[in-house]
Image (cartoon, rainbow, N blue to C red):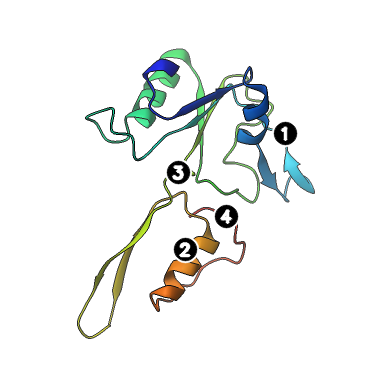
């Protein structure tokens, strides 16, 4: 399965990378980091040119999980307040898909009267980076206040 992926697959046996890849901040469940133990952490690469099909890593992961009875949790690259975007230590067979590399934001359209602006942003962008992009382009959007949360 892992050799078919373009992005990264991090397992429990990749000791140095695994600890940082599985890290999940949550203040609701604890006063800091939550113990997460995914079987694998998949970090798909949105810029991969090895496959004809877009988002192939995500599709392959879903197929693998379905065939092997794994649960999947998806994290947008930041954290989720109550830790639900990560595999719990109670989940015996769980794959964490980390979308942190899907962090591109671009300006798509502004009408001539400046009545509206359309931006496109990947789910992995942190709010602090989105705020910076919007400030540079004179755009306002109501949002949360935690800068490390992914979109």
Question: Secondary structure under badge 3?
Answer: loop
Q: Are marks 2 and 1 in contact (CB under 8 Å)?
A: no
Q: In the drawing, what numbered circle is on residue 130?
A: 2
Mark with earlier residue (3, 4): 3
* Residue where numbered disc 3 is placed: 101
The residue identified by callout 1 is: 35
Mark pair 2, 1: CA separation: 28 Å
Instruction: Identify the disc placed on residue 149.
Output: 4
Q: In 3D space, how far apart are the residues under numbered discs 4 and 2 (Cα atoms)? A: 11 Å
Q: Few, some or many C-alpha atoms within 10 Å of disc 4 (few <14, some 14-19, many ≥20)?
A: many
Q: CA distance from mark 1 to mark 4?
A: 18 Å
SS for tag 2? helix
Give the residue at x 60% y 31%: 87
Q: Kindly give the residue lying farthest to the bottom in the view shown.
A: 113
Q: Is residue 129 left or right of residue 107?
A: right
Left or right, residue 63 beside residue 30:
left
Q: CA distance from mark 3 to mark 1?
A: 23 Å
Instruction: Look at 22% across and 29% down and name the residue there.
Output: 52
Disc 1 and disc 4 in contact, CB within 8 angstroms: no
**Mark 4 or mark 1, which is nearer the start of the sequence?**
1
Residue 51 drawn above or below residue 122: above
| Relative side of 32 to 100, left or right | right
Question: How many marks do you count on the picture?
Answer: 4
Q: Under tag 4, what secondary structure?
A: loop
Image point (55%, 63%), residue name: 128
Q: Is residue 117 placed above or below 128 in the rendered structure? A: below
């Amino acid at each position: 399965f892992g050799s078919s992926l373009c992005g990264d697959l991090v397992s429990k046996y990749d000791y140095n990378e695994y600890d940082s890849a599985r890290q999940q901040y949550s203040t609701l469940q604890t006063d800091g980091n939550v113990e997460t133990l995914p079987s694998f952490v998949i970090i798909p690469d949105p810029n991969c040119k090895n496959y004809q099909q877009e988002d192939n890593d995500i599709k392959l992961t879903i197929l693998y999980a379905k065939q092997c009875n794994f649960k999947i949790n998806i994290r947008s690259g930041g954290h989720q307040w109550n830790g639900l975007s990560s595999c719990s230590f109670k989940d015996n067979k769980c794959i964490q898909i980390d979308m942190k590399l899907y962090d591109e934001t671009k300006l798509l359209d502004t009408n001539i009267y400046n009545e509206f602006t359309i931006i496109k942003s990947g789910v992995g962008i942190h709010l602090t980076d989105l705020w910076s992009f919007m400030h540079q382009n004179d755009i306002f959007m109501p949002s949360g206040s935690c800068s490390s949360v992914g979109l």
